[in-house]
Image (cartoon, rainbow, N blue to C red):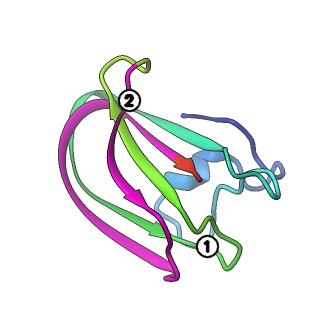
Amino acid sequence: MSSTSAKDSANVVAKAVDGDESTRWSSARDSNSDWFMIDLGGEATIQAVKIAWEVARSSAYTLEISDDQKTWTPIKTITETTSLVDDIILENSKNWALYSCK
């Protein structure tokens, strides 16, 4: 996994996908262009994404996939979220997944 930033050492990118809703990745404060990328370890089918937000959250974001980390294909764009949990159903196969704040 990699990311553009972390707000502090307690909220690193690995916590974005650790399955524990009491932990989180936190990007730098007041940044609208941060992202994190997940290496899926080879081609994988992404069936669903669940994002559990903290109160301070990005209101808009895009999920993208790639085979090579160079060409990214948007698979879901959220222009405004007001929920603390976003459940997104997908059917896509790729090697890499990217979450980017807007």
Q: Is residue 46 above or below residue 94?
A: below
Residue 32 point in image, percent of width and height:
69, 52
> Which quarter of the rendered picture does the N terminus lie within?
top right
- Which residue is depicted at the point 65% across and 69% down? 57
Query: Does the segment drawn in magenta span residue 16?
Result: no
- Which residue is depicted at the point 73% across and 55% down? 11
Residue 72 point in image, percent of width and height:
38, 29
Disc 2: which residue: 72
Q: Amino acid at mark 2?
A: Trp
Q: Is residue 80 above or below residue 39?
A: below
**Left or right: residue 19 compared with residue 73:** right
**Left or right: residue 67 compared with residue 52:** left
Marks 2,1: beta carbons within 8 A:
no
Q: Which mark is residue 22?
A: 1
Q: Nearer the viewer, residue 46 or 59?
A: 59
Circle 1 crowding by C-alpha within 10 Å: few under 14, some 14–19, many from 20? few
Query: Does the segment drawn in magenta span residue 79?
Result: yes
Which of the two marks, 2 or 1, is nearer to us in this view?
2
- Which residue is depicted at the point 84% across and 51% down? 8
- Which residue is depicted at the point 55% across and 54% down? 16
Q: Which residues are magenta?
A: 71-99
Residue 56 point in image, percent of width and height:
71, 73
Q: Is residue 27 above or below residue 51?
A: above
Distance from disc 2 to disc 1, alpha carbons, whole Å, reads 30 Å
- Give the overall secondary structure of the magenta segment: strand
Local SS, label 1: loop
Q: Amino acid at mark 1?
A: Ser
Q: Residue furthest front?
A: 79
Local SS, label 2: loop
Q: Nearer the viewer, residue 12 or 90?
A: 90
